[in-house]
């Protein structure tokens, strides 16, 4: 005879993780052992420090709060609702309860014996993987060092040389590097290269890489008579050098070398020229390593002679991205590769447009990518945000020079639109005269935004302060970066306003852990992943790096990782913020690819319980970070 109640319980369980990973007979085996508990509002299920029950719980109806007593104050650290599992981690860890669970309203709980469930979990790898993440939900910080979780399979992977994704492995680099000082004589350098039988020497000062001298430099600059062997080597070195951290992938090294037409990359402690040199990667090393997909696309970009061809390459990049997301390749690797391919595409379009101009550029200039591309976070094709900075010229020549670059920008913006980068609705593009300025004009603009700061200036600062050079003269963008740090260094009023801006979107969760959706407009009842989840992290990362004067790091996740390195007392919060950002960005990318859009607005009914659970954990980090900012910048009275 059928056990109708058990079947109903099994049908309920199979809707939620990790029970959805079990077979039907296993669900029935669990269901017949379930005890149903009916609890009124305010009833305690277990107290902090209580001895373990022999059951864990899943909520059939109602809501449960998890509380922890800290310094004699009881704080709510999480809220659970229908389908959420709690009380499981302590049973596996064999520890007393570290938190108190109490009903927020009338509840129906299913109490599941651990002795029935545990053997099933230990034999099922997928259930085990889920539980590792689930256990984190009972901690104050689910991204702490103890748990080291990477949401949405954003884990470190090991690939074999025969794998198609071998190019995602960290690149091998030379650790024993021959170096010299910038004041060394060229003759001395040539003898050293000959005696060591090497083709290059890194020029450094106090351990920081300044440049590189290669066989090619000696042939082209010394053997031709342009320089004498008695001159200091700084006169012929190639500078600056491109620097990366030690986790640089094979693919990224390959396409970077091709894009910049160079044969060497420096490995430094933090990936910038401002930290100690620890290794060197050469083009020769690359020939010994296998890797094709991204590098083939990079070669195709460099060979293209029409916008139509570039559009086809862009379509292949989208396929590559989809493959990486489906195969759960770590987002850190994926975003770096897609950024380099996007950047090379922009560069190729600018090169072709310059060829079509009747005259050479009148002065040096730089094309700046802004927003998500400027932060190296643009995975899906969104609208274009860009600007031009050009060298200072006499006042009487300014408009003539600007006119040249506006004509160039119009061609570039048009072709970027053709290959899939939509025009910016707010016209934040280089073809707009407002965003095609000389270096001094940009400096004056930035100074004005930070000294006469209203809502518009805050918005503009949040867009234009995240820039990255895509083409042109790096000294111009470096000068702008230095200026931004200079004008914000002691500007507490501006930083406070940035802080208020970082708190403008409250926690993405409403009462009883429900997602806050749009209340009207085109996207009514949809969840705005960009505004409510990504922007609070992006704004906070920018605010903190400006506050602590951190240069050359625009990527949000990398900003938080650098903060964690500099300020170990807040390491767990910063690392959790980095991981949360990568998880949410990967989630947006995944849904954008599925729906063939930019992934910004999510229909909640399409989310699985597991996806909602993972997002809610990320939202907890956002709430904690915003509270930290409120205290750090004394903003309680301003928000």
Image (tube, grey):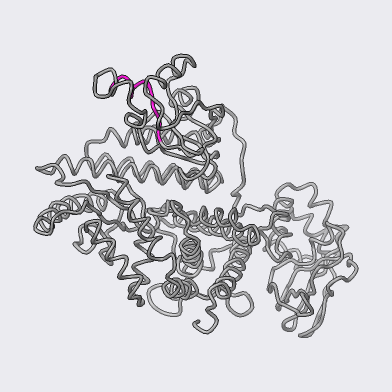
Region rendered in magenta: 211-220
Q: Residue at x 62, y 52 (%)?
A: 150
State the count of labels: 0
Residue drawn at x 41%, y 27% as measured from the top left: 184
Quadrant of the drawing holding the N terminus:
bottom right
At x 24%, y 24%, the residue is 226
| In this rendering, position of residue 361 left or right of residue 32 | left
**Whole-percent x, y for residue 584 in the image:** 53, 59
Give whichever of 334, 573 is nearer the camera: 573
Magenta stretch, main secondary structure, is helix
- Picture layout, residue 360 above or below residue 283: below
Between 491 and 43, the one nearer to me in the picture: 491
Res. 110 in view: yes
Q: Quadrant of residue 278?
A: top right
Estimate the x, y position of residue 532 in percent, counting from the top left: 49, 70
- 236 and 545: which one is in front? 236
* x then y, percent, for residue 264: 42, 30
Considering only vertical position in the picture, is 475 above or below 434? Answer: above
On the image, which quarter does residue 91 sit in? Answer: bottom right
């Amino acid at each position: 005879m059928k056990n109708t109640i058990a079947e109903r319980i099994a049908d309920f369980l199979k809707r939620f993780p990790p029970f959805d990973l079990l077979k039907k007979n296993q669900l029935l085996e669990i269901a017949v052992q379930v005890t149903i508990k009916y609890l009124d509002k305010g009833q305690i299920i277990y107290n902090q420090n209580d001895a373990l029950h022999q059951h864990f719980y899943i909520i059939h109806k109602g809501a449960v709060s998890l509380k922890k007593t800290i310094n004699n104050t009881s704080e709510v650290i999480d809220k659970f609702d229908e389908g959420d599992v709690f009380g499981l981690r302590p049973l596996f860890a064999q520890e007393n309860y570290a938190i108190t669970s109490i009903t927020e309203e009338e509840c129906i709980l299913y109490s599941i014996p651990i002795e029935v469930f545990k053997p099933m979990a230990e034999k099922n790898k997928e259930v085990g993987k889920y539980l590792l993440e689930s256990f984190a939900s009972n901690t104050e910080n689910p991204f702490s060092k103890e748990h080291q979780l990477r949401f949405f399979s954003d884990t470190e992977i090991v690939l074999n040389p025969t794998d198609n994704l071998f190019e995602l492995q960290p690149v091998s680099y030379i650790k024993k590097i021959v170096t010299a000082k910038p004041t060394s004589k060229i003759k001395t350098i040539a003898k050293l290269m000959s005696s060591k039988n090497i083709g290059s020497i890194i020029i450094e000062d106090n351990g920081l890489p300044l440049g590189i001298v290669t066989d090619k430099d000696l042939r082209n600059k010394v053997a031709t008579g342009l320089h004498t062997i008695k001159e200091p080597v700084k006169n012929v070195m190639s500078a600056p050098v491109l620097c990366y951290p030690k986790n640089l992938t094979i693919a990224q090294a390959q396409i970077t070398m091709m894009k910049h037409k160079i044969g060497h990359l420096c490995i430094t402690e933090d990936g910038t020229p401002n930290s100690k040199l620890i290794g060197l990667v050469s083009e020769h090393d690359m020939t010994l390593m296998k890797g094709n997909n991204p590098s083939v696309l990079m070669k195709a970009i460099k060979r293209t002679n029409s916008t139509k061809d570039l559009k086809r390459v862009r379509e292949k990049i989208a396929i590559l991205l989809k493959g990486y997301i489906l195969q759960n390749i770590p987002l850190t690797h994926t975003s770096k590769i897609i950024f380099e391919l996007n950047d090379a595409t922009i560069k190729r379009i600018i090169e072709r447009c310059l060829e079509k101009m009747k005259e050479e550029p009148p002065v040096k200039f730089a094309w700046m990518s802004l927003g998500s591309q400027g932060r190296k976070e643009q995975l899906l094709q969104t609208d274009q945000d860009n600007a031009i900075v050009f060298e200072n010229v006499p006042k009487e020549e300014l408009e003539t020079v600007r006119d040249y670059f506006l004509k160039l920008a119009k061609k570039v913006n048009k072709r970027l639109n053709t290959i899939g980068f939509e025009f910016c609705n707010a016209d934040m593009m280089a073809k707009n005269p407002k965003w095609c300025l000389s270096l001094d004009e940009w400096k004056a603009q930035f100074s004005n935004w930070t000294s006469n700061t209203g809502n518009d200036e805050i918005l503009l600062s949040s867009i234009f302060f995240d820039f990255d050079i895509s083409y042109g003269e790096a000294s111009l963008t470096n000068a702008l970066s230095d200026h931004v740090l200079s004008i914000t260094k002691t500007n507490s009023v501006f930083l406070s306003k940035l802080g208020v801006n970082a708190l403008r979107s409250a926690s993405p969760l409403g009462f009883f852990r429900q997602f806050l959706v749009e209340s009207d407009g085109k996207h009514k009842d949809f969840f705005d992943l960009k505004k409510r989840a990504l922007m609070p992290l992006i704004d906070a990362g920018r605010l903190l790096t400006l506050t602590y004067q951190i240069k050359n790091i625009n990527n949000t996740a990398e900003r938080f990782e650098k903060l964690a390195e500099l300020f170990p007392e807040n390491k767990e919060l910063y690392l959790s913020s980095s991981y949360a950002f990568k998880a949410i960005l990967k989630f947006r990318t995944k849904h954008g690819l599925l729906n063939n859009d930019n992934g910004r607005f999510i229909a909640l009914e399409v989310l699985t319980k597991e996806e909602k659970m993972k997002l809610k954990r990320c939202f907890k980090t956002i709430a904690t970070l915003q509270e930290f900012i409120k205290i750090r910048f004394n903003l309680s009275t301003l928000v």
